[in-house]
Image (cartoon, helix red, strand yellow):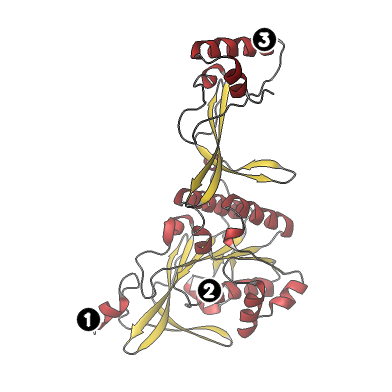
Amino acid sequence: MLDSVTQLFDHFVAEQTSVRRELLRIATALKRDGLTVLMTAERNSEYGEISRHRIEEFVADNVVILRNALDRERRRRTIEVLKMRGSRHVEGEVPITLVVKQGIVAVPLSSLRLEQQSSTKRVTSGNPELDRMCGGGFFRDSITLVSGATGTGKTLLVTNFLAGGAAAGERALLVGYEESRGQMFRNARGWGVDFEAMEADGRLKVVCIYPEAQNLPDHLLMIRELIEEFKPDRIAIDSLSALERIAPETGFREFLISLTSFIKKHEIAGLCTATNKSLVGGQSASEQHISTLTDSIILLRYIQEGDFMHRGIMVLKMRGSEHDKQIRRFTIDGTGMHLGQPFDGAPDVFGDSAASWREER
């Protein structure tokens, strides 16, 4: 281990030809003795010349670059294998994090393969009417996205999803990023669901943490460790939008790919929520193309009818299954969510619903 060759040559030579000659002499002598050598070199910038003397990378057989770039006021550590003589390697930057007793932990996304099996078994959403809209429930190894504005009932669907699993004898994991543990338990009691009893029976595990408490790779590792330790049959994450605000677009998509791949590999039924920025309507199911990585999408929308604001629900996508394509009314009371009849001449749920419906009426 030579740490670092940059400091070594800064003290003794300054001319590039001399640096290359002396570095070759050192490398040749060490390799002649059959040693595996690791050398470190410093850089002047995160994205620029590979090394300060601009020669070390040509002498070495393998080159690995570590970066700690600042993006949106947060640091993002990555590792890149730039060169590996005589061997294939993963190209591009890979997110890393530093873990106690483990060191550097990396997730090479480009090495992930879509090899998980596709189950035909259905599991309940926790709401019989929604199960019928989805063609009989969610697939066992599917990821469902619930997208809607604030207050439309996303957390209620999460509560139903967890309660439905517990009633079927399954183990459920809830990772909350927007509400405290006490608030989630209180809300569940308000809808007739006893999270305390589910947790006492070992059927539920609830973990609540602020997104800003750690970076995205650490959140990913935390979820993976929870899954490996608790071994749930279903998992709910409320919400992905909270995590989105702490990461750049590329980092967030990397997180989603890793998370969904890990959940599918373990054949766990997943439910994730995302908050739509538009209170009425909305141009997309979610931000940052979350929808393309999920198997099913459920839209929750506010729809104005005259002087009243109603709630509407729609199953936008369900891979591998027929589903109800109507926009159904629904209400929320002390016993939970109740689906009603479809809207008669309902507005466009992706646009300005209030304006477009007034024009039609």
Q: Is residue 81 left or right of residue 356?
A: right
Q: Is residue 183 left or right of residue 333?
A: right
Give 175 or 10, whichever is nearer the viewer. 10
Question: In this view of the protein, can residue 76 be seen by the observer?
Answer: yes
Question: In this view of the protein, can residue 117 be seen by the observer?
Answer: no
Of discs 3 and 2, which sits in the foreground?
Answer: 3
Q: Which residue is mark 1?
A: 359
Q: Which residue is mark 2?
A: 131
Within 10 angstroms of label 2, few (less than 14), some, or many (20 or more) residues? some
Give 33 or 193, whichever is nearer the viewer. 33
Q: Mark 2 belongs to which amino acid? A: Asp
Q: Mark 1 belongs to which amino acid? A: Glu
- Upstream in the sequence, badge 2 or badge 1? 2
Q: Which label was assigned to residue 58?
A: none
* Circles 3 and 1: CB atoms closer than 8 Å: no
Q: Position of residue 44 (x, y in %)?
A: 50, 31
Q: Position of residue 109 (x, y in %)?
A: 54, 43
Identity of the residue drawn at 53% across and 16% down: 14
Q: Mark 3 belongs to which amino acid? A: Ala
Quadrant into which the C terminus falls: bottom left
